[in-house]
Amino acid sequence: MAKHVCLLLCSIILNIVFSGLYLNVKWGEVSSLSTQLSWSREAAIEAEEVAAISCSGHGRAFLDGLVVDGKPVCECYSCYTAPDCSLLSLPCVADVDDGNPMYMEPYWMSKKESSGVLVSGWHRMGYTYIPVDDDGRKLSTELEKYIRKVHELVGNAETEGRHVVFGTGSTQLLNAAVNALSSNSSSPAFVVASIPFYPVYKSQTELFQSRAYEFKGDTSLWKNKTSNENVTFIEFVTSPNNPGGQFKESVLTGPSVKTIHDRVYYWPHYTAITTPAAEDLMLFSISKLTGHAGSRFGWALVKDEVVHQKMDSYVMHNTIGVSHDTKLRVLKLLKAIVDEGGREIFESGHKIMKERWEGLTTILSYSSRFSLQHIPPQFCSFYQRVREPSPAYAWLKCEREEDEDCYQVLKEAGILGRRGRLFEAEDRYVRLSLLKSQEDFDSFVQLRNIGFC
């Protein structure tokens, strides 16, 4: 018995000794690293000080924001004012117009350590990456690898056998794709989309006034007119759709038809993942994946090598590629998602969007003046269960005969939405964004003096 006690005590003593040695070594490493930090220490302190400014929870201070007396000051959310954003400003207009995904901000504030990135003043100062990859392209292979990993984790897109093209947001890639698909046409390609459609399809196509393509309106007008081999048809298919949130499929068929599949909302926050998308040309955006719309980063998954090269060339000629600072930030965000197993961000986002949709549908269920789009529950392979809808937008319709301008009806009640005509639909429709900050959404649902209830 005494022998066993002695051995136990020796074991405990040895563990204490080796643990102490290990901690001393680690502490020495940390202390050594701390004494070596110079510019990064100052940059980190500056970032921490600005992030610590609370703005009463109704605003944010930023390193590149407003400065008064040499110090960053709060930028208040809508409906709030005062130096610390503590005062509610009435009357308050509920702005649910744009697709600014600020609902994701609290999630990333809870991931400070894993999502933060410190950039040196000499970080990738040149135009392009060196060395080039096996295909001669100067790009971030590490970022491409994590894009493929995220898609694999979610199961929303096939990446094998497809090239990745980076763009300054998916907005740049929209026209890069149109340009690539129309380049072999002997006459201007006809660009079409099904109503209601994302307004940029039309506005951007018309902006460039290219001889190679022109916007030709609603897809249904050309359904049985694609047999002309001298005309190439380029169809935009948004699935889930913006503004309605429903799944869409291509309408046009035939050898002269080419399709661009806009998949920016095909993530578990907004919709059920029914099957991996496997189209020849698919577009995605960091804006709707992580909420970082201001970083302006998108990517295309392209099956055809020639189309891939033409899109890549377009981006290089248009902007000489994508900002290296942006790519570094996006890489850090995607690593944070993958390293945590690829579920937490989607569960957090889906919970918020689902609650907002359910809250709005409950309010409108008592109204005969307004109606919403119907989105049925569907089985989601990501969650392995049937999930309720959680769309990015409400596609609201004014049902009263006299309410022909639904936008104006809402505006008079203090709600700013987006007119139906911008989506080529009737003005009885208005798109209401569910992506905004909690303050914006709360202001919206509290305005019930227009017959919501």
Image (tube, rainbow, N blue to C red):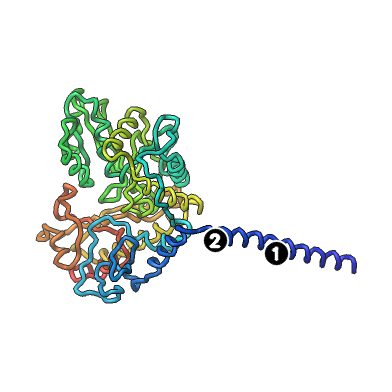
Q: Is residue 9 above or below residue 142?
A: below
Proximity of marks 2 and 1: CB atoms separated by less than 8 Å: no
Q: How many marks?
A: 2
Task: Kindly tell me whether residue 125 is visible in this rendering.
Answer: yes
- Please state the horizontal and vertical placement of residue 306, each as a whole percent of the image: 33, 27
Quadrant of the rendered structure where residue 192 is?
top left
Residue at the bottom extreme, as displayed? 87
**Horizontal side, residue 66 vs residue 275: left or right:** left
Q: Residue at x 25, y 64 (%)?
A: 364
- Please state the horizontal and vertical placement of residue 10, each as a whole percent of the image: 82, 65
Depth check, front residue: 59 or 231: 59
Q: Judging from the image, what secondary structure is the residue with disc 2 in?
A: helix
Type of amino acid at the residue the image marks with label 1? Gly
Q: Residue at x 27, y 76 (%)?
A: 87
Q: Is residue 196 above or below residue 79?
A: above
Residue at the right extreme, as displayed? 2
Q: Is residue 187 above or below residue 356?
A: above
Depth check, front residue: 113 or 241: 113
Circle 2 residue: 35
Quadrant of the rendered structure where residue 201 is?
top left
Circle 1 residue: 20
**Horizontal side, residue 164 vs residue 212: left or right:** right
- Please state the horizontal and vertical placement of residue 116, each as a whole percent of the image: 44, 57
**Horizontal side, residue 146 vs residue 206: left or right:** right
How far separated are the C-alphas under marks 2 and 1?
22 Å
